[in-house]
Image: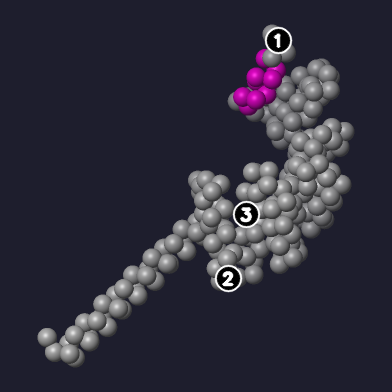
């Protein structure tokens, strides 16, 4: 084989190897995007790895970067890693100040830490940005309940029911608070209301049946 042909072959092999590496990198980047952004079945570890890889990669657009931080914030919140969640959601808000999802997630993290004041403030801000999203009142009520603020939670869940009477989950959550406070009559009434909306709500069924035993 001549030196020229050998050199050409080496160059071709190098190009094939480079193309393979690029294809592999592209496939991996696609996988990371699926884990971080796509609405599909994925583990918390996958979501965390995907969002972290994309954030560290430094190639995301401004809006996608904000979403990646907010989505990673969600994973940290689910894991009760509240300081990490707050840091990530704060980054998302810094990049995109109108990101209601980041405010709501950060609010939940604050409530999990027991900082009800900051929790409520973040949910309030989310509602100011998007007053048409009635889910924020319900979510704030759930967060307040988890933080032990029973009165605040009942007030929010009652408002959520007024805004959307078809929210069975709000009745169930409020009923559980009433039950914890010893008000079984109101609790049972809320469980029955939930079952009228959704006769297949297993949680409401079990809670109501427990009163009959």
Q: Please state the extent of the stretch shown in magenta in the rendering.
A: 201-209
**Figure check: 116 above or below 55:** above
Mark 1 residue element? helix
Answer whether residue 131 is visible to the viewer in this image.
Answer: no
| Label 1, label 2: how far apart the Cα atoms are | 58 Å
Residue under label 1, please give it: 212
Q: Quadrant of residue 126?
A: bottom right
Disc with the residue nearer the chain's start (2 vs 3): 2
Residue 202: x and y in percent read 61, 24
Depth check: 152 or 79 in front? 79
**Figure check: 189 above or below 37:** above
Q: Give the residue at x 76% y 36%.
A: 146
Q: How many marks?
A: 3
> Which numbered disc covers residue 72?
3
Answer whether residue 88 is visible to the viewer in this image.
Answer: yes
The quadrant of the rendering that contains the N terminus is: bottom left
6 with respect to 78 (left or right): left
> Which numbered disc covers residue 58?
2
């Amino acid at each position: 084989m001549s030196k020229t042909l050998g050199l050409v072959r080496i160059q071709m092999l190098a190009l094939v190897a480079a193309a393979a590496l690029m294809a592999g990198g592209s496939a991996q980047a696609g996988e990371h995007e699926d884990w971080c952004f796509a609405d599909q079945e994925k583990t918390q570890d996958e979501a965390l790895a995907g969002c972290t890889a994309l954030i560290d990669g430094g190639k995301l657009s401004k809006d996608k970067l904000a979403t990646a931080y907010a989505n990673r914030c969600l994973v940290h919140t689910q894991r009760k890693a509240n300081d990490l969640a707050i840091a990530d959601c704060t980054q998302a808000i810094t990049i995109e100040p109108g990101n209601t999802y980041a405010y709501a997630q950060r609010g939940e993290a604050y409530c999990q830490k027991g900082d009800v004041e900051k929790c409520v403030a973040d949910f309030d801000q989310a509602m100011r940005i998007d007053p048409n999203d009635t889910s924020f009142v319900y979510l704030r009520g759930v967060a307040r309940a988890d933080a032990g603020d029973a009165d605040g939670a009942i007030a929010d869940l009652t408002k959520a029911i007024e805004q959307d009477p078809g929210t069975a989950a709000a009745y169930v959550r409020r009923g559980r608070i009433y039950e914890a406070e010893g008000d079984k009559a109101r609790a049972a009434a809320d469980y029955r209301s939930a079952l009228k909306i959704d006769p297949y709500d297993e949680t409401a069924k079990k809670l109501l049946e427990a009163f009959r035993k």
